[in-house]
């Protein structure tokens, strides 16, 4: 890894805006549970905004919203039922005992208490525990993701035989890696929201937001903060926020990226087999040492039925060709629509549609080569089959959007654009009918 850490630029205004979003979440939470100022709260200009002993509620947010606080609000308050390390360990124990993926992680280690002991050893400052309490109570699914990622990282610390200090830094990074999301407008993160290019920037800076947040804590500002900054970077340079490649990414950043994605897959897929093929399909983007380690410990050996696989391959060859045609058609439509403001929603959907395929590892220019290179490897064929199945859902959603907005779309396209959207619609229909 390079000694110089590449940190994307974030303006003071953006940081202040993100902190304001978080402060609002704190004040809304204060309407449901007790959050009290433990000291006077001042603005950067020296104005006293909140007196010690004041309960933090919505009316307080209205008072501080237009001010930059001299220090983050979580450093100045006490929160009812604030999270403790013992709480984290107890919740992790429940996950390890009840979810198959994590059951197998624990069973693969000689010391059954190792994972929980590693979590028990970390030392988180009170302001960080305050922030995690806000995440737990305001965004429970996000908190669960942080916790589960920490368990996976604890497993990796065992597998890689990390020295205690590095292990602590890794697990602290895991439990805090997405705290920057709390500084993003929650409307942008809603499942049905179509993210614009401008909004995507706010999403892509959340690792940097987390990095800057951790700079306030001497024990966390080093390797821990760097891992948080890099948890969405990918070895092939396709990640964000800096597009780092290979050894430009720290070893803890590489480990955290695998742990974070592995847990994300446990939310997306219902079986361990699906998790396995999804990881296999993206091998070039992650450190294979950790991918293979994870797969070996959670997967059971399975016999492959050669006859059935060949049938699937025959179907896949045709399907991959159709997917490539759809991809090309979206490019054609975008060439006519991308600069038209009334078609902003369409453009965003087309971009996200292509992004899904590229993110999953599909190269539309090499779909025949993809098939030929993998046709004798049942495991790889399973991975491609999984991508195709996911693609069909995306295909259906895009077609539904185009059909529902047909008149509006065509009103804003010239004749060549109308032909392009008609071709795309036909390709989408053909793919669903196959």
Image (spheres, rainbow, N blue to C red):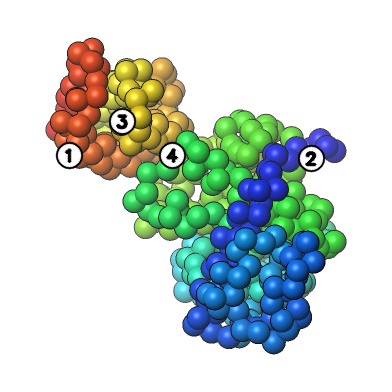
Quick one: label 3 or label 2, which is nearer the N terminus? 2
Q: Which mark is residue 404?
A: 1
Q: Is residue 189 visible?
A: yes
Q: Residue at x 47, y 74 (%)?
A: 98
Q: Which mark is residue 343?
A: 3
Quick one: label 4 or label 1, which is nearer the N terminus? 4
Eyeballing the image, is 6 above or below 417?
below
How many labels were placed on the picture? 4
Q: Residue at x 85, y 38 (%)?
A: 3
Residue 249 at x, y percent in the picture = 72, 39
Which type of secondary structure does the marked residue at label 1 adopt? helix
Residue labelled with disc 2: 5
How crowded pointer 1 is (Cα within 10 Å; few <14, some 14-19, many 20+) is rated as few
Cα separation between marks 1 and 2: 47 Å
Residue labelled with disc 4: 196
Judge from the rendering whether residue 199 lies leftward or rightward of residue 434; answer left or right. Answer: right
Which type of secondary structure does the marked residue at label 2 adopt? loop
């Amino acid at each position: 890894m390079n000694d110089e850490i590449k940190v994307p630029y974030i303006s003071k205004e953006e940081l202040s805006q993100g902190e304001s979003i978080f402060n609002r979440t704190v004040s809304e939470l204060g309407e449901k549970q007790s959050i009290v100022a433990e000291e006077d709260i001042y603005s950067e200009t020296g104005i006293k905004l909140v007196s010690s002993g004041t309960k933090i509620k919505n009316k307080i947010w209205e008072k501080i919203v237009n001010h930059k606080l001299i220090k983050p609000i979580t450093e100045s308050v006490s929160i009812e039922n604030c999270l403790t390390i013992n709480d984290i360990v107890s919740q992790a124990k429940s996950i390890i005992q009840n979810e198959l993926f994590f059951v197998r992680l624990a069973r693969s280690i000689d010391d059954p208490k190792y994972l929980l002991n590693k979590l028990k050893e970390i030392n988180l400052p009170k302001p960080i525990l305050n922030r995690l309490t806000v995440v737990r109570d305001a965004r429970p699914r996000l908190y669960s993701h942080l916790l589960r990622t920490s368990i996976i990282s604890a497993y990796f610390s065992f597998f890689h035989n990390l020295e205690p200090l590095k292990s602590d830094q890794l697990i602290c990074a895991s439990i805090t890696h997405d705290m920057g999301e709390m500084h993003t407008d929650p409307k942008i993160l809603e499942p049905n929201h179509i993210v614009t290019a401008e909004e995507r920037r706010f999403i892509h800076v959340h690792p940097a937001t987390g990095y800057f947040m951790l700079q306030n804590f001497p024990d966390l500002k080093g390797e821990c903060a760097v891992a948080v900054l890099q948890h969405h970077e990918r070895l092939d340079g396709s990640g964000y926020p800096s597009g780092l490649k290979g050894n430009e990414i720290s070893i803890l950043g590489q480990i955290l990226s695998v742990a974070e994605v592995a847990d994300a897959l446990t939310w997306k897929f219902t079986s361990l087999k699906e998790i396995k093929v999804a990881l296999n399909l993206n091998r070039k983007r992650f450190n294979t040492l950790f991918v293979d380690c994870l797969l070996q410990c959670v997967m059971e050996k399975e016999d492959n039925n050669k006859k059935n696989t060949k049938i699937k391959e025959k179907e896949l060859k045709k399907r991959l060709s159709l997917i490539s045609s759809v991809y090309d058609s979206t490019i054609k439509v975008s060439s006519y629509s991308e600069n038209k403001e009334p078609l902003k929603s369409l453009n965003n959907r087309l971009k996200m549609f292509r992004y899904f395929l590229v993110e999953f590892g599909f190269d539309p220019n090499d779909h025949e080569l993809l098939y030929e290179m993998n046709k004798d490897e049942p495991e790889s064929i399973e991975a491609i089959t999984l991508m195709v199945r996911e693609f069909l859902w995306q295909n259906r959603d895009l077609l539904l959007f185009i059909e529902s907005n047909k008149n509006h779309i065509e009103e804003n396209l010239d004749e060549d654009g109308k032909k392009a959207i008609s071709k795309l619609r036909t390709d989408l229909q053909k793919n669903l009918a196959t």
